[in-house]
């Protein structure tokens, strides 16, 4: 069954420019993303040419400085663009979020010379980024990573190790890599910008995932990858702090993608309930189903409000880490519940791959795991309320 274009959401946007931007994104989604989404996901095809279009349209650097090719947009606007893209196809929305995450270290912590050298291509020159923090033995416990970078006599760094669960692995033009340059723990980690074609960098076979089949995820092997010190981002030993700051913003991106995915599922469920007839009338006439749809809509609206409230705190320069964790937690849990309920609304058809809601359900599960599992989000929130855990 063909997928439906995302239904317009009644949005609160701060400027006429922002409204025009969202209108542009909806048009791109309708023309370029939705028609091929189901077929490409089934085939496991990543739409690289679409990301070239998004880059040319200024959509891969929205929250960053226009002096380097960014869009100067507040997170309040950027997240609503992400939501629109994810509603059309999660692979696309998530891909933009990951690219923005990968660009964060250089955009926010690089030198002026580094920004001038690399950011224009990253933000508007067609490049695609990947973020390399997790490893086979360190996911939630990211500070225990083992990938090591060692200085050689001429000042270059030589990086050796394996990164795991890397979105865009094998396709990325640049990798933001966190590697150990000092002792154990968070204080021994440094950030590096590694070119996608660096000698010694290789990629394993893609993971065989439950959903998001069009978004490649794989291990990245760094076997003596040599890069100059000019590609070290930030001070030595500051990499983990940079990584956590990036993830605080990245969690808002995942929350927005979850809202978009849930909205797509609700749209399908409402359309089905309005046209499907049983016992001589549309199933939307039955109170039990109407209440189900009402609960789905309420979860989405609450998630959208929570996500945007956290974004506004970020835009105001206020601390937002616990609010980002709350948004990621609530919105991804809501997406899981909403997509499950959408399958229920469609009944047997919802369980069929001929209808998009079964794919939405499989995709929603990933969002509860990526960029910090929802158990980690609860730890972040509780730490904010109670302080560090006592031992």
Image (tube, rainbow, N blue to C red):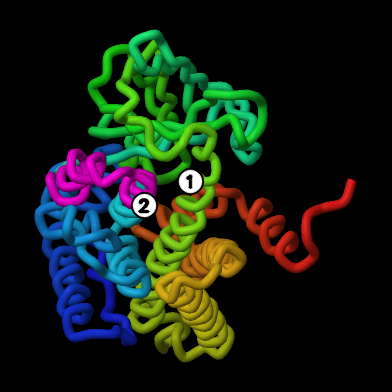
78 versus 191 height, above or below: below
Callout 2: 10 Å neighbours few (<14), some, many (20+)?
A: some
Q: Position of residue 224 (x, y in %)?
A: 39, 11
Q: Nearer the viewer, residue 156 or 45?
A: 156
110 versus 57 height, above or below: above
Secondary structure under the numbered disc 2 in the rendered image: helix
Q: Identify the mark nearer the N-term, 1 or 2.
A: 2
Q: Which residue is mark 1?
A: 242
> Extreme right residue here?
391
The quadrant in which the N terminus is found is bottom left
Magenta stretch: dominant SS? helix
Secondary structure under the numbered disc 1 in the rendered image: helix
Separation (CA) of disc 1 from disc 2: 9 Å
The residue drawn where x is 14% and y is 64% is 28
Is 1 displayed left or right of 367 in the figure?
left
- Mark on residue 108? 2
Q: Which residues are magenta?
A: 99-125
Q: Is residue 331 visible?
A: yes
Q: Position of residue 155 (x, y in %)?
A: 36, 16
379 versus 180 height, above or below: below
Residue 100 colored in magenta in the image: yes
Dots 1 and 2: beta carbons under 8 Å? yes
The residue drawn where x is 20% and y is 50% is 123
Q: Nearer the viewer, residue 290 or 85?
A: 85
- Mark on residue 340? none
């Amino acid at each position: 069954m063909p997928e439906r274009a995302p239904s317009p959401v009644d949005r609160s946007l701060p400027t006429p420019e922002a409204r025009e931007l969202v209108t542009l994104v909806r048009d791109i989604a309708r023309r370029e993303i939705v028609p091929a989404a189901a077929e490409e996901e089934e085939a496991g095809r990543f739409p690289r040419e679409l990301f070239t279009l998004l880059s040319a349209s200024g959509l891969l650097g929205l929250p960053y400085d226009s002096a380097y090719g960014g869009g100067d947009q507040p997170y309040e606007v950027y997240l609503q663009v992400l939501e629109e893209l994810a509603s059309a196809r999660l692979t696309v929305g998530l891909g933009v979020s990951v690219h923005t995450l990968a660009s964060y270290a250089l955009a926010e912590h690089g030198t002026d010379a580094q920004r001038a050298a690399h950011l224009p291509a990253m933000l508007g020159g067609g490049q695609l980024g990947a973020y390399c923090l997790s490893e086979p033995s360190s996911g939630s416990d990211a500070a225990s990573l083992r990938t090591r970078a060692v200085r050689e006599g001429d000042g270059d760094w030589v990086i050796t190790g394996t990164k795991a669960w890397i979105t865009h692995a094998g396709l990325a033009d640049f990798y933001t890599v966190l590697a150990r340059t000092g002792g154990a723990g968070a204080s021994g980690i440094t950030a590096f910008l590694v070119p996608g074609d660096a000698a010694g960098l290789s990629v394993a076979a893609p993971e065989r995932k439950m959903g998001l089949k069009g978004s490649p995820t794989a291990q990245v092997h760094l076997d003596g990858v040599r890069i100059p010190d000019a590609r070290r981002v930030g001070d030595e030993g500051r990499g983990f702090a940079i990584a956590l700051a990036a993830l605080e913003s990245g969690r808002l991106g995942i929350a927005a993608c979850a809202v978009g995915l849930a909205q797509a599922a609700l749209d399908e469920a409402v359309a089905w309930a309005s046209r499907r007839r049983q016992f001589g009338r549309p199933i939307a006439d039955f109170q039990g189903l109407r209440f189900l749809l009402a609960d789905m809509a309420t979860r989405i609206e609450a998630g959208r409000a929570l996500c945007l409230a956290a974004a506004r705190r970020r835009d105001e320069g206020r601390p937002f880490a616990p609010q980002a964790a709350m948004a990621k937690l609530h919105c991804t849990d809501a997406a899981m519940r909403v997509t499950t309920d959408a399958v229920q609304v469609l009944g047997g058809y919802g369980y069929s791959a001929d209808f998009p809601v079964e794919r939405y359900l499989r995709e929603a599960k990933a969002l509860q795991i990526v960029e910090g599992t929802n158990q980690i989000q609860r730890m972040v929130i509780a730490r904010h309320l109670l302080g560090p855990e006592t031992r």
